[in-house]
Amino acid sequence: MTAEAVNAEGGRRNAEHRGGVVPPRDLRERTKAFAVGIVRLVQELPRGRVADVIGGQLLRAGTSVAANYRSARRARSRREFLAKMGIVEEEADETSLWLDLLIEARLVTSTRVFELRHESEELVAITVASIRTARGGGGSVPRSAFPVPRSS
């Protein structure tokens, strides 16, 4: 296992874990539980064109978080780890969008969707912190782990 994967597993989170240390393997299990929650939510969506389209996108993005995190843990290099964790970040953020759309379109009202929305935000924050740590960078704190292109 790479040092970056160890950091992503056992590294420190800020407010997401109230200053505590994330136990080893917790993030792997957490992303898997998140994927299962997304699967169950999509299964319970009302049938209809809009819910089917959003549900399909939600299912793809939400389950991709766990799959790509698992892949990142098997990375053969720092560069590969960073690339996979970047995908985890993107997919967790995209999942938040689809959950927001379900909420705002009033297709769901359960507290579970709000819990999943909160969890997706936390997974984005954890992933960004892991990427930043793996890059060895301190300095400024961007909203995303991806560099912002600058115009000359």
Image (cartoon, helix red, strand yellow):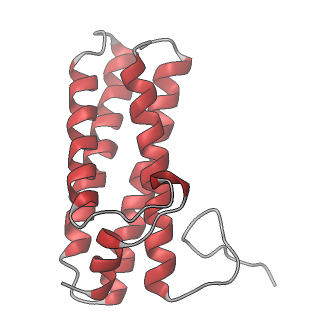
Q: Is residue 95 visible?
A: no
Q: Position of residue 128 (x, y in %)?
A: 50, 66
Q: Quadrant of the N terminus?
A: bottom left
Q: Nearer the viewer, residue 61 or 36?
A: 36
Q: Nearer the viewer, residue 67 or 150?
A: 67
- Toward the viewer: 24 or 94? 24
Q: Is residue 46 above or below residue 140?
A: above
Query: In screen coordinates, is 113 left or right of 66?
Result: right
Q: Residue at x 32, y 27 (%)?
A: 55
95 over 85 or under it: above or below:
above
Residue depicted at 52% across the width and 15% down the height: 105
42 or 53, nearer to the observer: 42
Q: Is residue 145 left or right of residue 33?
A: right
Number of marks present in the image shown: 0
What residue is rendered at 41% in x and 19% in y?
A: 111
105 lies above or below 124: above
- The outermost residue toward the right is 152
User: Can you give x and y, in whole percent of width and height, for residue 72 in the image?
Assistant: 26, 72
